Amino acid sequence: MTVGSTIYQTIKHDIIFGALKPGEKLKLDMLKKRYDASLSTLRETLNRLASEGFVDAPEQRGFYVHPISVDDLREIANLRVLLECHALDLSLQKGDTEWEGNLVAAHHKLYRMEQERLAGNQTKTEDWKRYDWEFHFAMIAACDSKNLLDLHATIFDKYLRYQMLVLTYRGEVAMREHKAMLDSALSRDAELTKKLLAQHVENGLIHCLEAMDEQELIPQR
Amino acid sequence: MTVGSTIYQTIKHDIIFGALKPGEKLKLDMLKKRYDASLSTLRETLNRLASEGFVDAPEQRGFYVHPISVDDLREIANLRVLLECHALDLSLQKGDTEWEGNLVAAHHKLYRMEQERLAGNQTKTEDWKRYDWEFHFAMIAACDSKNLLDLHATIFDKYLRYQMLVLTYRGEVAMREHKAMLDSALSRDAELTKKLLAQHVENGLIHCLEAMDEQELIPQR
DNA sequence: CGCTAAAATAATATATGATATTCTTAAGTG
DNA sequence: CACTTAAGAATATCATATATTATTTTAGCG
């Protein structure tokens, strides 16, 4: 698929980065114009997104961007910790030197981006988030379980949507957390790395919840 | 959707229960005749199943039933333990009397079915597996995380496909395991219940691996 | 004037046929 | 025997048509 996979990525991207808003009705007619694809292709895409949970598809009533809620965010943060910690365990056991190299590289790129943001350059948000993803992925890449990596990637994206929603930047703190995780991972201290990761996500969650509260973005359920 | 969701369930069922074999090519023409649905509906269905991992959809080359492998089974068993144990933790914390009632009921139905099988009645395999699912689901039903339950349900189904593949029956042993889990869950002993569950799945895994080996069903990767 | 029911409208789910592209296979060539 | 080419098969995409179901509007009634 060329058209299909393109549309899929585009719509998923638009949901994650908020161009398509939580709860928004996805009328096929509108999508057709907006993404310039045929009905069939669009419906295939929406079905995939529905089964991943980015889109709701109540019977006979079309498609909606999956709504947000505090509970949903909490669940997702918990699942991210669960899956990523488990993957970390495996990855720190199995990772070889090649893995270490990729990890160091991924961290370096993320670090550069974080520096830039600290210096005041708030552009390139998507690049920054991509580097963040690539770093976390590099950490668990050696876990050697495709099933696990797939589940994690989806949950990560769902978590990312909430982060993008409130666009909160934790600056130097998150930067230090990333560095600490890199170090503990390289020294193969799984327990410490998992603890740091859990805190990292937990801190992000708190930040996110506060911002959602301030911006009055959200129903409790 | 009536046609759509029906076809979805049917094809998923046929994959899990082996009517559609691992690695089998799913030609649209063939599916059209077999399930009596239109191309568009079928493609929507296959896209959903692909995103859940029951079907592979390599670009431009149609659809295939996701192949089996020893590694895949191992990954899935591990993920089932991870997700179900986590959900157990939450569920034992939060479950109320209503939950206990449903759990006892689910166990009773499973127990009856297991008795019947022990007595030699090997029919109703699908009912038996449904009761097994309902029991495990009842255990974690109070975890209060839709995201978690969804992930678990999918992993459970993938695990089930392997079980159906080798059709091994662990008889009295599995029966005792279920009873032990019921008791420890009702007494809210999360650690014990998790331990029992991990063993339960691990035992099933071993059984499955042995049977796969005997039946020469499988490539290592 | 507010409410319910009927009618009109809009949108979805499904099916079909058409076309361009791509994959697969078989045949032929060097 | 490897490689290229040509034929055939299958897929991906699109446009269109229709039945069914939601939603909105309108009209009628209390």
Image (cartoon, coloured by chain):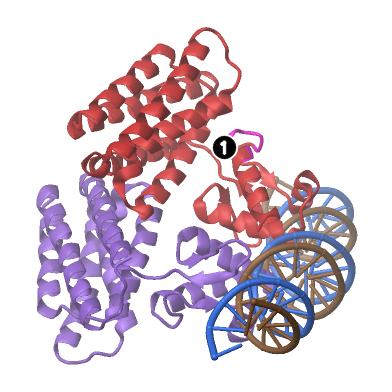
Chain colours: A purple, B red, C blue, D brown
| Amino acid type at mark 1 | Ile
How many neighbours does mark 1 have within 10 angstroms: few (below 14), some (14-19), or many (20 or more)?
many
Q: Which residue is mark 1?
A: B16
Q: Quadrant of residue C28?
A: bottom right
Q: Residue at image x 34%, y 16%?
A: B176
> Relative to the observer, which residue lies in front, A65 or A193?
A65
| For residue B121, side relative to residue D20 (left or right) | left
Q: Percent position (x, y) of residue B189?
A: 18, 31
Q: Quadrant of residue C22?
A: bottom right
> Relative to the observer, which residue lies in front, A70 or B47?
A70
> Relative to the observer, which residue lies in front, A37 or A69?
A69
Q: Which image quarter is the N terminus of chain A in?
A: bottom right
- Which residue is situated farthest in the top direction here? B119
> Relative to the observer, which residue lies in front, B193 or B220?
B193
Q: Percent position (x, y) of residue A59?
A: 60, 61
Looking at the rendering, the stretch of residues picked out in magenta corresponds to B14-20
- In this orientation, does residue B137 appear? yes
The reply to whether the magenta stretch includes residue B18 is: yes
Q: Subunit of mark 1?
A: B
Q: At numbered mark 1, what does the secondary structure look like: helix, strand or loop?
A: helix
Q: Residue at image x 25%, y 56%?
A: A78
Q: Residue at image x 26%, y 63%?
A: A136
Vertical order, C24 against D20 (above or below): above
| For residue D7, side relative to residue B113 (left or right) | right
- In this orientation, does residue B221 appear? no
Vertical order, A181 against B115 (above or below): below
